[in-house]
Amino acid sequence: MSDRICRHCDYCMPCPQGITVSHILDYEPLSMSFTEEYFFTGNMATAMAVAAECDNCGECVNKCPYHIPITDMIAEYVKKYNEGKKRYLKKQATRT
Ligand code: SF4
Ligand code: SF4
């Protein structure tokens, strides 16, 4: 059975690219918990830049006992994040 709910067990770690998988998979709740400023400039910005380096090696997917589609989710969240960040920076630029 496959789902998209990460249990934070970290059996998928370590990632050779240094991606904090369970943190990235929390993208949706984190995006709703933080201010835009913190979300797009704080620790999440660093974590998402690292996540963008995922090379689809599949190590994490093979180790996850819950068969979470980790690489698909990371790609989806990196895309969403970058689009959101672009909108955020544009909004900031028009304020100055
Ligand atoms: S092994 Fe699976 S459930 Fe556990 S932290 Fe990694 S992605 Fe989440
Ligand atoms: S597929 Fe991506 S996230 Fe998973 S171990 Fe490889 S580089 Fe890390």
Image (cartoon, helix red, strand yellow):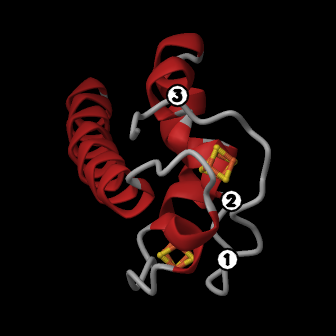
Residue type of the residue flagged with mark 2: Thr
Residue name at image x 69 percent, y 63 percent: 12
Residue type of the residue flagged with mark 3: Glu
Vertical relation: 47 (above or below) 92: below
Instruction: Answer left or right for 76 relative to 41.
Output: left
Mark on residue 20? 2
| Ligand 2 neighbours mark 1 (CB distance < 8 Å) | yes
Vertical relation: 61 (above or below) 85: below
Vertical relation: 50 (above or below) 94: below
- Image location (x, y in percent) of residue 42: 65, 42
Q: Earlier in the sequence, mark 3 or mark 2?
A: 2
Q: Are marks 1 and 3 in contact (CB under 8 Å)?
A: no
Residue type of the residue flagged with mark 1: Cys
| Residue that label 3 marks | 37
Residue name at image x 54 percent, y 16 percent: 35
Mark on residue 15? 1
Determine the CA span between mark 1 and mark 3: 28 Å
